[in-house]
Image (tube, rainbow, N blue to C red):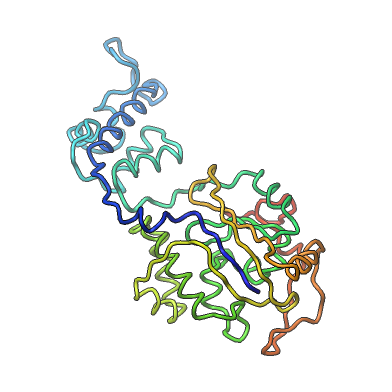
Amino acid sequence: MVVVSIDTSIPPAASLRTAAPNTAPRRRSELASFLRSRRERLDPELMGLPAGTRRRTPGLRREEVAQLAGVGVTWYTWLEQGRQINASVQVLDAVARTLKLDQAETEHLYRLADVAAVPALTGCRRLDPEVQLILDGLRPLPAAVVNGRSDLLAWNKSYALLFPFLVNAPEDKRNSMWQVFTAPKCCHPFVNRQEELGRMVANFRARYGRHVGEPAWDEFVKRLCAASPEFAELWAEHGVADGGVRVKVFRHPALGELSVVVTTLDVAATPGTRMMVYTPNDEHTRERFEVLRQDSLPGGATYECGHSFDAPPLSEMESPLSPCADRPREA
């Protein structure tokens, strides 16, 4: 299967060479204004504090926020004044809880404070159900939604038929990077395997550069290095590449080789996620994609090595957003 990939998520190399301005003063000013606004919206009585008669401004006082968060009054005052101080993940987490910040606000706080290790928050933001309607409406075109680490979050039935090994993987391994580096070489989907794997790692490192120090990213890299010496070797080369148009060649046991254009679109409602849509690049692929309108593939398919290709029933490969999914999955 030949795949032409268009990835719009990486800025052009020329723009990466432009020196970035010093945004720290502006960021600290924005942090100060943000903290004040969140503090002033809180009701002292609802926080278990006496309303008092001498409150001249709405909300909590700085010393009250510091006390409830378990941090020093002077430190919190400096933080809210936008002074240049170091803030740890643990302290910012305590401030976020005290100020009753939701997920988006908490992530905003960490980034304004210039803390690299933004924690993986519980109850992470899920994709909107409408995303699944869009995916399903694209059939027979295979389409899926992934995050920056290439975790597979949602897909349509055509995508499941095209990549059953991926959608049916355990949740902690339902990741395209993980699957292509741990799949047996004899059953690997890529024809030009070495070239494509190198390109995938270089693209992944470009995205990783925006998440250096984040536990979820570092843990994934550590796990994949341990599982795949080949990935570890490529990762150690520090190759970086942007997206752009390129040709991939891979095979499908039941459909043969397909030429596909992959268009990547950001899902703005869930930052850090993108939708990938596979469109046929030639008449042969267009005809093969018509098979994906069905709920199953022709039986008896094998890999070139002779191993059988047994795709599970679609009922076992439902997208997490599908109303038919029989078990909850984090998106």
Residue 14 coordinates in the image, percent (x, y): 36, 56
Q: Which residue lies furthest to the top in this view?
A: 53
Give the left or right position of residue 2, taking residue 197 as reference: right
Front residue of 116 and 69: 116
Front residue of 196 and 213: 196
Residue at figure coordinates x 72%, y 53% from the top left = 138
Residue at figure coordinates x 69%, y 87% from the top left = 307
Give the left or right position of residue 138, taking residue 99 as reference: right
Give the left or right position of residue 156, taking residue 224 as reference: right
Measured along the vertical axis of the image, is residue 240 above or below residue 301?
above
Q: Residue furthest bottom?
A: 305
Measured along the vertical axis of the image, is residue 226 above or below residue 85?
below
Q: Quadrant of residue 94?
A: top left
Residue 176 coordinates in the image, percent (x, y): 55, 67
Residue 319 coordinates in the image, percent (x, y): 67, 57
Question: Quadrant where the N terminus lies?
Answer: bottom right
Q: Quadrant of residue 55?
A: top left
Q: In which quarter of the image is residue 296?
A: bottom right
Residue at figure coordinates x 52%, y 58% from the top left = 7
